[in-house]
Image (cartoon, rainbow, N blue to C red):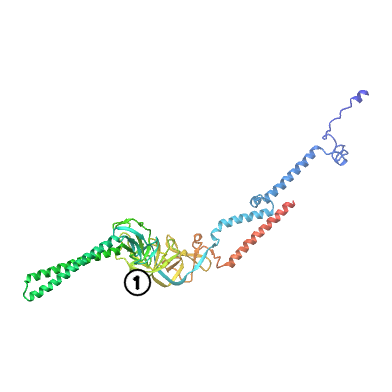
Amino acid sequence: MDEQQKHPETPRPFDSAHRPSGAAGTPGGPGGPGNGTPPTPKRHRGRVIAAIVAVVVIAGIVLIRWHPWGGTSGATAGAGASGASGAHAGRGGRGGRGGNAANVPQPVHVATATQGEMPVVLTALGTVTPLANVTVRTQLSGILQTVAFQEGQMVKKGDMLAQIDPRPYQISLANAEGTLAKDQALLQTARLDLKRYQTLLAQDSIASQQVDTQASLVKQYEGMVKSDQANVDTFKLDLVYARITAPVSGRVGLRQVDPGNYVTSGDTNGIVVITQLQPISVLFTTSEDNLPAITKQMRTGTKMSVTAYDRSNTTSLEAGYLETVDNQIDTTTGTVKLRAMFQNPNNLLFPNQFVNTRLLVNAIKDAVIVPTSAVLNGSMGQFVYVVKPDSTVTVRQVKVGPVDGERTSIKSGLQVGERVVIDGSDRLREGAKITIPAASGAAAASGAAHASGAAAASGARRHRHASQASAE
């Protein structure tokens, strides 16, 4: 008894395979779960695994549906009807962009061909050339006493510029005047003697040889007096040259010599350079092909207008007229020189300045005119895109006439009233569809409203899906 109490019998392991279904400890039996006994570990692990699988599946569905790539990958995975429809829409969008890109209307700007007067203008690069460019030099040798001008000053013809020391020439003038007075006195005495000798010869009281000798002496003194008078005039002229004046009207440049220097007539730089600015001329060239039209206008006495523009060819400087054409053509370039005259009241034209000249030769009336940007160049020549009534374009080859800046005349290939593309032509081809924002604002607004409505609907759908996902 004591040993049995000390060593109780070890319970035998439960063998479910050999236990009857209604026995205690089996499911449904007295010891089953329905009778308050705890569940077995195997069933507990099955429930945990099922819960984990469900969570993973739900998370996968959410990620597939709402991730940025959910519109395509979710569609291919077939995760729900809405995902499939979104995938179908995405595939359709890609196909639409790839297959119908050529049929998408291109936005362009157009202009209407008008009828008007087109001037025939010849453009060329010219050089401003003064009519007079004088280097003022002294004609005497002496000390430069004063300079009476300021650099850059506008002077008139005859204005005093500088003064050379006149005293040596004044002394020479006084000496010449003294010699002249002496010789004039001798001439007067010789003439009186000749008169007396002639009276005695008439009385036959003197030989005729003496009278002839006296007459020759009178001639000699007369020559001396003339020479003396010439010397006097020379020294008077030297005094005039000692006072240096402006030979022409114009603008003086930088002073080449300072007062106090000894100047001579052989100085290379002179004293100053005077350039005439008003009027002033522009020399430019044109092709010999344009010479007949120019000479035709000149023969009729027409003064063709010439406008001078700055180097950028945007700002008009002065307006003048064509003065003359050179007398020969340059054989090396095939061009001829022309001279245009400008009054230049504001001195906007400066000597040796490069300008762009525009010579108006003639004017064509009732010409078809389009913007210059409408005319394009291609392998077939010059052409334009003409807008058809069905909002498509067609390529039209044209023959271009005179060009005046932003306007171009069309000789043939285009009619007045037809519309041509002036901007956006690089995306066009024959038969391409176009939209004209400036002319069809209503259609553009309708298209914009349609696009914004589609975008709003798509945004609303995404908003609903996001709300559903957050709720889950």
Can you say whether 83 is above or below 234 in the image? above
Rendering coords of residue 141 (x, y %): 29, 58
Position of 3 with respect to 344 (left or right) is: right
Say which residue label 1 marks: 297
Q: Point out the image quarter for the N terminus.
A: top right
Mark 1 residue type = Gln
Image point 66% across, 60% down: which residue?
456
Q: In this view, does 318 lie to the left or right of 268?
A: right
- Quadrant assignment, res 142: bottom left
**Residue 167 or residue 439, whichever sits in front:** 167
Tell me if I can see residue 220 in this picture: yes
Residue, x 62% and y 61% (percent of image)? 451
Q: x and y percent of residue 401 in the render?
A: 41, 67
Question: Which element carries disc 1, helix, strand or loop?
Answer: helix
| Quadrant housing residue 134 | bottom left
Observer-nearest of 196 and 290:
196
- Does residue 429 appear left or right of residue 181 in this picture? right
Horizontal side, residue 222 vs residue 336: left or right: left
Residue drawn at point x = 55 percent, y = 58 percent = 101
